[in-house]
Amino acid sequence: MLWQRERFAVVHPGDLLVRRLTIGTPLSANDIAAIERLPLTTKELPAQAAIVREGERPSQCCLLVDGFACRSKVTDLGKRQILSIHIPGDIPDLQTLHLRVMDHDLTTLSPCTVGFIAHDVLRTVTREQPLIAEALWRETLIDAAVFREWIVNVGRRPADSRMAHFIAEVGKRLEAIGLATAEQYELPMTQIDIADALGLSPVHVNRVIQELRRGGVLELRKHSVSIRDLPRLMELADFDDLYLHQSPAL
Amino acid sequence: MLWQRERFAVVHPGDLLVRRLTIGTPLSANDIAAIERLPLTTKELPAQAAIVREGERPSQCCLLVDGFACRSKVTDLGKRQILSIHIPGDIPDLQTLHLRVMDHDLTTLSPCTVGFIAHDVLRTVTREQPLIAEALWRETLIDAAVFREWIVNVGRRPADSRMAHFIAEVGKRLEAIGLATAEQYELPMTQIDIADALGLSPVHVNRVIQELRRGGVLELRKHSVSIRDLPRLMELADFDDLYLHQSPAL
DNA sequence: CGTCGGGTTGAGGGTGATCAAAGTTTGTGG
DNA sequence: CCACAAACTTTGATCACCCTCAACCCGACG
């Protein structure tokens, strides 16, 4: 992943945020300037590091500048469920701005660069510039739309379809930020992680991957995804990218 | 449900909204007045009526004044997944304020009274009074928190536990608005609906209900839930109400 | 009284879980 | 650079949870 870190090192984290927010909401020059002025302290984290944990009351939000992270919960029986995957440009704990206590964990999947923005600064800006508030609000709404699709995925799709949907979603989102082509991307997750994201056992995930490989749909080897037959994948996945709301709000 | 409709008929829908929003966010008298001034057109709907459908671009949000509703999606194989249950005081399509196109359906479960608030009015108010925006934003964040818990529920809990969790959640939320005691409430859902909410088959839902009944945990008969052993239910459900964020934001 | 939606029951099967062990890759320290 | 450990992947065998199909029952309602 080193190439990736270096690639993003040249991008100012504030720019990353501006680029992201202006996709959905038309911001004024004034708004954009305000976002760029946001004080941001960046930090490097190793893989598998906790960014925030369930029960904590953070006083800042985290902008993922580089690397992959995920949100997860653990049941009383010790089973882990991954709730979402996060990629550069995401603000995976934006909800802490208005929900004080974390109801789940946020963890890095790969080595990450994260930028932290203090809640009080963010709250001041959003109160003074309503369009910034709306742009951020919209981000959390897209988040929720993805959660909804995941409920459908784990609730109603068979394992192969579930897997295909997951691969399609992550690919689509990486493509939107220029980190993937339609058929090839890096995914720093073990089969155990994928199992936790899909609500399956690791053993079954392994078998599904092999089945998709044999079927010529996709290759999935050591953190690298290659889609061999995109139409088949999409059909198997029952994938409709509407829920990602990647086109502008208006 | 008639007693319920009459009960709520005396409450002005605007009050319902004020009461709900002030739980989480401290609003000024000015804010409260603005909310009460919001023009609201109410409408009566029968059970099983579509309020908004996937693909539509509504120009208003819907405040559920009385009755039950749910959000759902259908896969290409025709399987339905219910994404959330909504009770009086909820604004189940608040996300349409910033995400133009609906990515799922919103349907009544019982006869409902709904109040509609135009997007443009809502947008004006939220831009002028940031605390109202924050209060509404917070509502959508709690929504998302519930979605997350549902991912865990369908992804990682066995059928009986899943059922128990669902019953516990709805009870807890109804209790918060004074529509249920801890052990008794009305739930206008068929076993088919419950199956679609839990990602199970109707037949299996039936068997799980019987098992819980025999075990003395709960009764569930024709739209009426009676919890016989609340501690057992909670334990079985692995239920922690943290994710409902029912205590104030601050 | 007949119909219809919903609940209940039984039989049989399949998807995916669990358990266990053997490969394989990765990383680390000597 | 090699040796070793740890983490991850793969495979096989067995099992259970839950699904499907099909029939029947029941109460509500026209």
Image: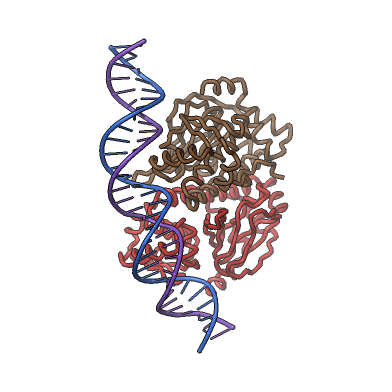
Chain colours: A brown, B red, C blue, D purple
Relative depth, front residue between A191 and A110 = A191
Relative depth, front residue between C16 and A192 = C16
Residue sitting at x 49%, y 24%: A44
Relative depth, front residue between B35 and B114 = B114
Name the spot of residue B175 as percent of width and height, x first.
46, 61
User: In the rendered image, is residue A121 in sight?
Assistant: no
Position of the C terminus of chain A, as image quadrant, is top right
Decide: is B130 above or below C3. Answer: above
User: In the rendered image, is residue A157 in sight?
Assistant: yes
Name the spot of residue D29 as percent of width and height, x first.
55, 81
Q: Quadrant of residue A232?
A: top right
Decide: is A69 above or below B28. Answer: above
Decide: is A12 above or below A22. Answer: above
Relative depth, front residue between B67 and A4 = A4
Q: Quadrant of residue A174?
A: top right
Marker count (numbered): 0
Is residue B66 left or right of A73 when viewed as pictured? right
Residue sitting at x 64%, y 69%: B44
Name the spot of residue A244 as percent of width and height, x first.
61, 43
Residue sitting at x 61%, y 59%: B63
Name the spot of residue A224 as percent of width and height, x first.
50, 30
